[in-house]
Image (cartoon, grey):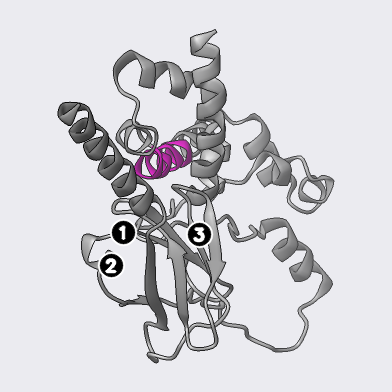
Amino acid sequence: MCEVKKALTIIGLFVVVIVGRAQQSIHGVLLDETSDEAVEFAHVNNITIKEGTITSLKGTFEIKASEGDTIVFSIVGYQRIGWKVKPSWLEETFTLKLPRDTIFLDEVIVNNLPSEEVFKRRILSYEPADTAFWYHGIPKPKPYNNAPLSEKQINNPLFAILQPTDFLYEKFSKSAKEKRKYHQIVTTQTRDQRVYQKFNRDWVKDVTGLDGDELTSFIDYCDYSLEYLDKTELFFIQQDMLAKLTEFKKSEQG
């Protein structure tokens, strides 16, 4: 009888410890990295257990969390950043500083309008800037300095009319075609390298806890395109992947 009571006591303590851990909360303050002012109404999400809250007027917040959970902070005008919960966060109020998301505008020069001929040529040679999302912490690739004309520019009727010699060269010259092909390869390699730095096997393993053949099967199951991985923020990829993980485990069990 005594042994049974001792076993029940140990089980009861174990349950209390687990419940206490699940209900544990952390208290923090979110500040502007530059000014040290409070960041108000920022979204605070524990993506590990899918809990969320917002910061107060003083930048303070409280959210349920355990050691190792990932807390993501986001608000317009600042970089979206995630931190892993440290043991010290469970014991006392901590302070985090969020860096601003700075955007530099290109220089604008205002002068008299050019002639119609010059204006047409500028329109034909204009290449719009890449407005795709960029990932903080990853260096931008160096631009290919001698980029050829695109197929869209070459097939523009105005190009054939205004610059017939250049049109014939770009349209039918073997060297021009090889140049465009090489440029496409260089551009693709840059995108592939950018995607690998952001989305790779080790990162998927850390997020999902899968390994070996099961990890390989899950990556194949997700079937993400390079275009999607390149232009989608890592946080949203992670959320989508975690949703797919549940479906994947069900399919494996079935």
Q: Amino acid at mark 1?
A: Val
To which residue does mark 3 refer?
Answer: 45
Q: Marks 2 and 3, Cα distance to the nearest angstrom?
A: 16 Å
Confirm whether residue 24 shows in the render. Answer: yes
Q: Quadrant of the C terminus?
A: top right
Q: Is residue 193 magenta?
A: yes
Give the residue drawn at x 46%, y 87%.
38
Q: Are the residues flagged by discs 1 and 2 in contact, CB closer than 8 Å? A: yes
Q: Say which mark, if any, is on residue 141.
A: none
Image coords of residue 88 (percent x, y)? 22, 66
Image coords of residue 159 (percent x, y)? 76, 49
To which residue does mark 1 refer?
Answer: 85
Q: Quadrant of the N terminus?
A: top left
SS under mark 1: loop
Which residue is at the far front?
Answer: 1
Confirm whether residue 142 shows in the render. Answer: no
115 relative to 172 in the view: left or right: right
Image coords of residue 225 (percent x, y)? 55, 31
Q: Marks 3 and 1, Cα distance to the nearest angstrom?
A: 12 Å
Give 99 or 114, whichever is nearer the viewer: 99
Q: Amino acid at mark 3?
A: Asn
Between label 2 and label 3, give the one nearer the viewer. Answer: 2
To which residue does mark 2 refer?
Answer: 89
Disc 3 or 1, which lies upstream in sequence? 3
Q: Marks 1 and 2, Cα distance to the nearest angstrom?
A: 7 Å
Q: Main secondary structure of the magenta part?
A: helix
SS under mark 2: helix
Image coords of residue 144 (percent x, y)? 43, 51
SS under mark 3: strand
Q: Quadrant of residue 207?
A: top left
- Provide the residue span drawn in magenta: 186-199
Q: Amino acid at mark 2?
A: Trp
